[in-house]
Amino acid sequence: MSQSRKSLSTGALIAIAIALGAVVGAAGIYWKASPSGNAPVEESLAVAEAGTCEADPEMLATLKPLATGEVAAMAVREDPVALPELGFVSDQGEAMTLADFSGQALLVNLWATWCAPCRAEMPALAELQSELGDENFKVLAINIDTGDVAKPKAFLDEIGVANLGLYRDASMGVFNTLKKEGLAFGLPVTLMIGKDGCMLGAMNGPAEWASGDAKALVAGLKAL
C-alpha cells in the first residue's frame, strides 16, 4: 500500500469526489454521510423477503466487534436479510447474479471510474482479494459506469488490478435497486454477503480495505 494513498483522508477523498461529480454531472450518487458515518440501515431497510436466511444470529453477533477502526462504518445486521435479485455481467459478458457465487462469502463493492473514493479503494480491495480470497470468500467489485467497457477496463489496467475481474452493470440497476431498498445512498457502497447469499452488513462510504481491521472483519465473515 503506497504512502500517498495512506495520506489521503476520507474527508479529502469525499471533497475530491464531489468536485469531480460536479464536472461530470454524477454528484447525485456520491456518498452522503449520516452523522454516524453510515446510513441507518436497520431503520430504513425495506428489503423484500425474497428467500430464507438461516445464519445463526449468535454467530452473526460475533461480527459486530470486528466492525471497528477502519471499517467501523460497516453496519452489521442483527439478523441476515434476503436481497432482491441483483443482476450484472462478467468480463466475458455473461449474465450473473449473486446466486452464481453461492457457497462463497462476498464483499460486494459498487464502484465507478468517476468516483474518486472508489478509485482510491481499488488497490486495497485487490490486496484483500489476494490475501483472503479463496473458495470461501471473494471480493465482488461491480462497476456501474454507463457506456461501454473501455473506460473501466483502462482504469484497472492503469493501476495494475487484474485479480478482481471486471463485473459490470452499465444500466446502474444494481445501485438503483439497493437505493430503493434503503441500502445505497451514494458511492462507494459495500455489502457483506453470507455464503447463503443473504446480506449480513452494509456500508456507505470509503474504507481502508487493506487494513488489519478490514482483514479481521473478512476473516470473521469467512468463518460464519
Image (tube, rainbow, N blue to C red):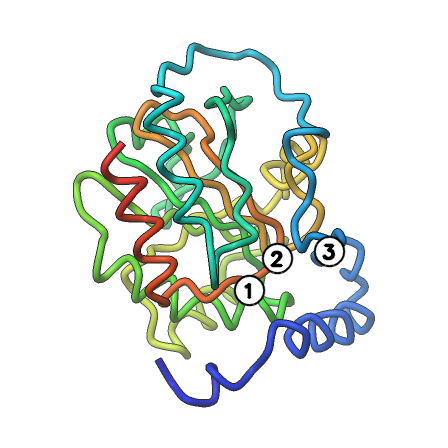
Q: Which residue is mark 1?
A: 118
Q: Are marks 3 and 1 in contact (CB under 8 Å)?
A: no
Residue drawn at 55 percent across, 56 percent down:
111
Between residues 64 and 168, which one lies in front from this camera angle? 64
Q: Are marks 2 and 3 in contact (CB under 8 Å)?
A: yes
Q: Which label sits on residue 205? A: 2
Earlier residue among tags 2 and 3: 3
Residue at far bottom of view: 3
Disc 3 residue crowd, few under 14, some 14–19, many 20+, Cα 10 Å: some
Earlier residue among tags 1 and 2: 1
Residue flagged by tag 3: what amino acid is it?
Ala
Instruction: Please identify, in this view, whether the residue under mark 1 or under mark 2 is nearer the observer.
Output: 2
Residue drawn at 66 percent across, 42 percent down:
184
Residue at far left of view: 135
Q: Are marks 1 and 2 in contact (CB under 8 Å)?
A: no
Residue flagged by tag 2: what amino acid is it?
Gly
Is 141 on the left or on the right of 169, as rendered? left
The N terminus - image quarter: bottom left
Task: Give the distance between the C-alpha atoms of the residues marked 2 and 3, in whole angstroms.
Answer: 7 Å
Disc 2 residue crowd, few under 14, some 14–19, many 20+, Cα 10 Å: many
Q: Helix or strand or loop: what does disc 2 sit on? A: loop
Taking 13 as reference, is 37 above or below it? above
Disc 1 residue crowd, few under 14, some 14–19, many 20+, Cα 10 Å: many
Q: Position of residue 3 (x, y in %)?
A: 42, 89
Is 49 on the left or on the right of 135, as rendered? right
Residue drawn at 39 percent across, 71 percent down:
123
Q: Which residue is mark 3?
A: 33
Q: Quadrant of residue 158?
A: bottom left
Q: Quadrant of residue 95?
A: top left
The C terminus - image quarter: top left
Instruction: Please identify, in this view, whether the residue under mark 3 or under mark 1 is nearer the observer.
Output: 3
Q: Helix or strand or loop: what does disc 1 sit on? A: helix
